[in-house]
Amino acid sequence: SVVVVGSINLDIVATASRLPTPGAKVTDASLTRHPGGGAANQALAARRLGADVSLMGRVGSDPAADAALALLRESKVDLSGVVAVPDEATGVALIAVAESGENQIVVAPEANLRLISENLQIPAADALIGEHLAPGDAVARAIATFNGFTCVVLATASEVDETVLRDADLIVVNESEAAWYSESLALRDGLVAKTFGASGAALYRGSEELARASSPAVAAIDTTGAGDAFAAALTVALVEGQSYAAALRFACAAGAAATERHGAQPSLPTRDEVQRLLRE
Ligand code: ADP
């Protein structure tokens, strides 16, 4: 089983021909709303890959909360650790997606900010996946006490907690985060997975490269959620006892599959879909 800690958002997605440059405007967008948020995406990704999953997070007491949790509820993710905070709004991500599949995201965390200070009672599980928001946040505190495999996704360009750097079994970063955090990550003994978009990913321990995988070639239409699918799949595969190389291939296929449909959560693949992509 997997417990996931972190943000739950409603994604408001504008799909347009291209992304605006700063100060410019693009006026040909169409609008959709999807459930999103890093932890919510990771939870649903792990669930669709076959794991029993519980999610811990904070939403507001507004109609957006129901919309944000709809797919998780449908897929039977345990939501008993998700609290609706009175007088708060549910987190919102404003996402612009271009025809090329590239995106640009602005997040208003709202109720998710409660996770920085609250003391969560993390249930027992084989693995913990946490989205790290700031030093000393609930994820950093959970890592210190959790008994099992721990994966941390570095979501923002802020400082990384010392505990997370030292104790997390796996840290997942994309290319820009890898550059931003390179000095801190170089000092670690644990695993670091770096994702390179369409070019795949690599797994390191310190400066040693343990495995490298390319991504299956797909017709990517929306990369939102690819990193979350990757992190969830890598954790699930490693906890299942797959080798580093096999687990990394599996995670790359899950990330690639998540780019083939619109939206973060609607696009998360089932295990069958990932395996089909691995056989192609
Ligand atoms: P993030 O979404 O966090 O920025 P990446 O863009 O690196 O992370 O994507 C994570 C993983 O998803 C990649 O390692 C890759 O396996 C897969 N992926 C992302 N974009 C594509 C793409 N255009 N084609 C194929 N696979 C992709």
Image (spheres, rainbow, N blue to C red):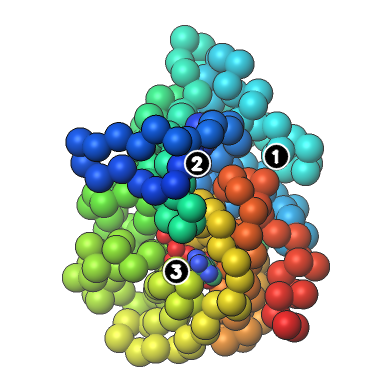
Query: Residue 180 sits in which quadrant?
Result: bottom left
For label 1, the SS is helix
Find disc 2 in the rendering and name its residue: 15
Find disc 3 in the rendering and name its residue: 197
Type of residue at label 3? Gly
Q: Is mark 3 within 8 Å of ligand 1?
A: yes
Instruction: Mark 3 vs mark 2: give the one in front.
Output: 2
Picture coordinates of residue 23 (x, y %)?
A: 20, 36
Name the residue rendered at 52%, 82% in the picture.
214
Instruction: Mark 1 vs mark 2: give the one in front.
Output: 2
**Residue 10 horizontal side relative to residue 187, left or right:** right
The Cα–Cα distance between marks 3 and 1, rounded to whole angstroms, is 26 Å
Find disc 1 in the rendering and name its residue: 72
| Residue 166 appears anywhere in the view | no
The Cα–Cα distance between marks 3 and 2, rounded to whole angstroms, is 20 Å
Name the residue rendered at 55%, 40% in the picture.
36
| Residue 102 appears anywhere in the view | yes
- Residue, far top: 87
Q: Nearer the viewer, residue 115 or 42?
A: 42
In the image, residue 165 sits, relative to residue 211, either above or below, namely above
Type of residue at label 1? Leu
The Cα–Cα distance between marks 1 and 2, rounded to whole angstroms, is 24 Å
